[in-house]
Image (cartoon, helix red, strand yellow):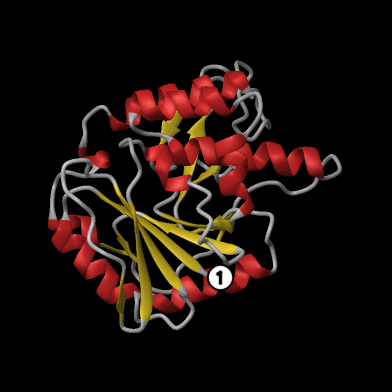
């Protein structure tokens, strides 16, 4: 599979990531999206025999994480943030994805609070435009039946969804504009796009949800090497709730 990671200015972190993930025999190519418009990206290279490709988009947008690049030649793409995922867990997710190629597969689920809900509704909101993004669920299982979203902290998917996200006919401009304005929420947008595609391509009741693969090892975080990540911003959860509601109304 192809590994997609992004960087702006935390170059020590990037060096650690490339050294660590290039040791996987399952990764054919690592594509680094270079978001820094003021510093030229390094030349393409090889690390531990793995090909490293640097992609320099013309604008600094999180939408660039999902560029359907011509040199992504594998069916599977694995998108990671600053996560240090044990290679065995990464390979397990790849094995799970090969049996469920139409689904998003990952190890970082998130929940949605639907606001007011009727008893027995599983937390589904009676007012669908008043959702709240949650980083964890502490409610009883009766209220929250599973998770709603899979994050790009650890997400494997079919490369076709890169094209669908970028060229989604009627809603593409809405998703891309929300992500560009907020500099956030590209993973929420991908969840909506994939769910809509799965729902339209399969009979009613077919499973369109992302799949959670429980890691066997503790998930580390290269991002602890610095404090400039997007999740560090105080407005992060508020922005994601706003994105969630905008996209939910559209879809």
In the rendered image of this protein, does residue 200 appear above or below residue 150? above
Find disc 1 in the rendering and name its residue: 94
Given residues 178 and 84, the one toward you in this image is 178
Q: Is residue 146 visible?
A: no
Seen in the picture, residue 54 relative to 168 is either above or below; the reply is below
Residue visible at 33% across and 38% down in the picture: 58
Quick check: 57 above or below 42? above
User: Residue 212's quadrant in the figure?
Assistant: bottom right
Quadrant housing residue 114: top right
Q: Residue at x 59, y 18 (%)?
A: 249
From this view, report whether residue 88 is shown above or below residue 243: below
Q: Residue 224 vs residue 207: left or right?
A: left
Mark 1: secondary structure: helix
- Taking depth in this image into account, of 125 and 169 the one nearest to the observer is 169
Judge from the rendering whether residue 2 lies leftward or rightward of residue 15; answer left or right.
Answer: right
Q: Residue furthest right?
A: 203
The spot of residue 170 in percent (x, y) is: 65, 23
């Amino acid at each position: 599979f192809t590994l997609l990671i992004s960087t702006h200015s935390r170059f020590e972190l990037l060096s650690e990531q490339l050294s660590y993930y290039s040791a996987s025999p399952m990764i054919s190519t690592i594509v680094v999206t270079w978001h820094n418009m003021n510093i030229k990206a390094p030349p393409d290279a090889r690390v531990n025999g793995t090909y490293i490709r640097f992609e320099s988009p013309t604008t600094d947008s999180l939408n660039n994480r999902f560029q359907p690049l011509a040199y992504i030649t594998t069916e599977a793409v694995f998108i990671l943030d600053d996560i240090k995922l044990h290679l065995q867990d990464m390979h397990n997710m790849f094995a799970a994805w090969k049996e469920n190629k139409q689904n998003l597969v990952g190890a970082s689920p998130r929940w949605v609070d639907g606001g007011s809900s009727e008893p027995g509704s599983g937390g589904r909101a009676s007012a669908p435009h008043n959702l709240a993004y949650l980083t964890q669920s502490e409610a009883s299982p009766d209220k929250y039946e599973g998770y709603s979203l899979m994050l790009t902290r650890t997400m494997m998917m079919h490369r076709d969804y890169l094209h669908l996200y970028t060229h989604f006919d009627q809603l593409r401009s809405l998703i891309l504009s929300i992500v560009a304005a907020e500099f956030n929420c590209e993973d929420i947008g991908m969840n909506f796009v994939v769910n809509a595609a799965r729902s339209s391509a399969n009979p009613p009741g077919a499973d369109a949800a992302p799949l959670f693969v429980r890691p066997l090892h503790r998930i580390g975080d290269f991002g602890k090497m610095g404090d400039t990540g997007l999740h560090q911003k105080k407005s992060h959860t508020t922005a994601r709730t706003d994105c969630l509601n905008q996209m939910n109304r559209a879809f």
